[in-house]
């Protein structure tokens, strides 16, 4: 009930006790600056976490719907096994499309590693068939068995070894994003606690005078809680706004390249940073309340 009363007092401001808290000083600037900086970092941590999660999900989904059949056979048998593998794929449920890659497409796949002048016609590079799956998917075990019988040199690769690391990376990125937000909240609470304790210690004489005229510790604590919570809220609003402006000013995908594709927020996700200032205010409220009552118990 005491905490609820403090929250109501904070919202209504009916006590007017926060006039006993000095409106300026290094603790005020420290609280506002800390809240703004942490809110800015929280917005960026949230944006990067969501963007990397979307990117990994998009890669994983793209790989999940495509597969490759690689044909390694003697030169005189490549065409026959290629035709046999295409016939097997044509009659396989779950295959939406299957087409052999041209020499130009295979050269483009190898160009990042060997350069543009690779003499692909002189090298024994396996023939490749690109397979696009339907939404129902392919029975990989059954397809491998059929290929082993009809085209022994054909190897079906459903990109599982590529998908699984991406899924693990997405899960780890989400965990790291949540951990970053928790660390930012903890750092904010620590800095605001130190600022509140410093302000209480610096105003020991004011506190003693208030006690002499009958003020309760609850009254004094609410004064500090209200003032520092509002300072934290104002700083968090400024930091969140700067973070949103910085993210909105980032280059778009067509100008920045593939890695920055989707960096930032998409659609309703732009509303998520609006949660940062209230959360910072709640953290400041809890931290200041704890610091105030602790300091008042230690102040004679």
Image (spheres, grey):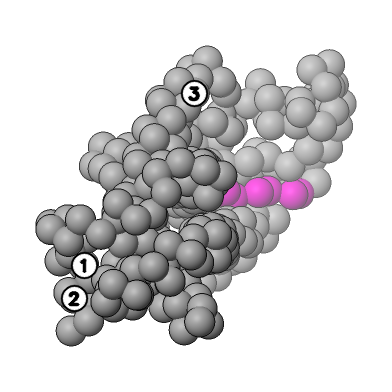
| Residue assigned mark 3 | 250
Q: Secondary structure at mark 3?
A: loop
- Which residue is depicted at the point 55% across and 59% down? 202
The quarter of the displayed image where residue 82 is located: top right
Upstream in the sequence, badge 2 or badge 3?
2
Depth check, front residue: 4 or 209: 209
| Residue assigned mark 1 | 7
Residues packed near mark 1 inside 10 Å, few (<14), some (14 to 19) or many (20 plus): some
Which residues are drawn in magenta? 68-73
60 w.r.t. 291: above or below: above
C-alpha span from label 2 to label 3? 42 Å
Residue 129 coordinates in the image, percent (x, y): 57, 42
Q: Is residue 29 visible?
A: yes
- Which residue is depicted at the point 83% across and 22% down? 115
| Residue assigned mark 2 | 4
Q: Secondary structure at mark 2?
A: helix
C-alpha span from label 3 to label 1? 38 Å
Total marks placed:
3
Upstream in the sequence, badge 3 or badge 1?
1
Residue 241 coordinates in the image, percent (x, y): 37, 33
C-alpha span from label 1 to label 2? 5 Å
């Amino acid at each position: 009930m005491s905490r609820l009363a403090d929250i109501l007092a904070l919202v209504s401001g009916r006590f007017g006790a926060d006039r006993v808290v000095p409106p300026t000083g290094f603790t005020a600037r420290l609280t506002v600056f800390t809240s703004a900086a942490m809110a800015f970092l929280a917005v960026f941590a949230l944006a990067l976490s969501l963007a990397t999660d979307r990117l990994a999900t998009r890669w994983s989904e793209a790989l999940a719907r495509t597969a490759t059949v690689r044909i390694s056979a003697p030169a005189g048998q490549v065409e026959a096994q290629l035709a046999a593998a295409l016939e097997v794929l044509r009659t396989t449920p779950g295959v939406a499309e299957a087409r052999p890659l041209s020499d130009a497409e295979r050269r483009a796949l190898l160009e990042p590693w060997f350069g543009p002048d690779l003499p692909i016609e002189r090298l024994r590079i396996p023939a490749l068939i690109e397979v696009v799956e339907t939404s129902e998917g392919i029975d990989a075990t059954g397809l491998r068995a059929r290929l082993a019988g009809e085209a022994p040199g054909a190897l079906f690769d459903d990109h599982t070894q590529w998908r699984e690391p991406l899924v693990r990376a997405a899960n780890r990125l989400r965990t790291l994003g949540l951990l970053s937000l928790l660390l930012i909240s903890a750092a904010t609470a620590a800095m605001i606690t130190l600022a509140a304790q410093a302000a209480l210690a610096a105003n020991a004489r004011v506190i003693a005078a208030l006690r002499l005229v009958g003020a309760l510790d609850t009254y004094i604590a609410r004064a500090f809680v209200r003032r520092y919570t509002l300072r934290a809220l104002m700083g968090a609003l400024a930091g969140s706004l700067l973070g949103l402006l910085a993210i909105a000013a980032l280059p778009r995908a067509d100008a920045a390249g593939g890695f920055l594709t989707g960096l930032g927020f998409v659609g309703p996700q732009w509303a998520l940073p609006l949660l940062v200032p209230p959360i910072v205010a709640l953290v400041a409220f809890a931290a200041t309340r704890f610091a105030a009552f602790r300091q008042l118990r230690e102040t004679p």
